[in-house]
Amino acid sequence: MPKINMPKKSPSLDMTPMVDLAFLLVTFFMLTTKFRPEEPVIVDTPSSISEIKLPERDIMMITIDKDGRIFFDIDGKQTRANLIEKMGERYEVKFTPEEVKRFSVLSSFGVPMANMKQLLNAKEKERETINKETKGIPADSLKNELADWINFGRHANPKFRIAIKGDGQANYPVVKDVIKTLQGQKVNKFNLITNLEEAPKN
């Protein structure tokens, strides 16, 4: 019996579902990605060989720049809204709902409470100027606003992990004041942010 040769055809793939899937994924990531707001101060952290990674949420960050200015940041919109209202009550500063909303999405800040309304009502360019000219959050023995930010922040979210991000050229007395402030709030466990350095080879 003669052998029947079936005509060979290359399989055809419909790529339409794959293209649809790719666009769906791109759309998903565009809608769910959260861009970090621009930091008001640039800090060059010292190096270390520690590989402990901080969690992505529930972080209270205290930043010290090379000029010894202190900046403060916490995450969570509702937490930030509660925090600014408590600080307003503490320092007798009345914030409008719009100012509270602006604070809830603000990046780290380094102004005294007396200048907070000015910062919240400033436009982006004016805010940059304020951040450049500010002397930072007071943390000395005469006026320690940082202690209140830490205290009310921990009450707003007890799960906060506290981290200090200090510039490698920052004055040690300022770092010492920050640590002393933390200890005054009964915080004896915190993280120091550093750049990862390769461990020495034996």
Image: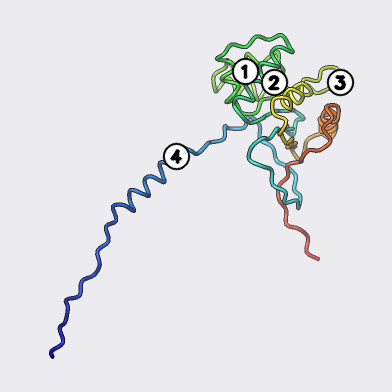
Gap in angstroms between the C-alphas marked 3 and 2? 17 Å
Please give left or right for residue 18 compared with residue 126 in the image.
left
In the rendered image, residue 4, in percent from the top left (x then y), is placed at 15, 83
Q: Amino acid under label 3? A: Ser
Q: From the viewer's perspective, is the residue at label 2 or at label 4 nearer?
A: 4
Quarter of the image with the C terminus is: bottom right
Task: Tell me the amino acid under the disc marked 4.
Answer: Met
Q: Of callouts 3 and 1, which one flags the residue occurring earlier in the amino acid sequence?
A: 1
Asked if residue 194 is positioned above or below residue 177 in the image, the reply reads below
Q: Is the residue marked by circle 4 packed among few (<14), some (14-19), or many (20+) residues within 10 Å? A: few
Furthest toward the front, the residue is 1
For image coordinates 76% across by 53% down, the residue present is 49
Q: Which mark is residue 141?
A: 3
Q: Which amino acid does the dot numbered 1 rest on?
A: Leu
Image position of 29 with respect to 2: above or below: above
Residue designated by label 2:
111
Q: Earlier in the sequence, mark 2 or mark 4?
A: 4
| Label 2: which secondary element | loop
**Amino acid found under the numbered disc labelled 2:** Val
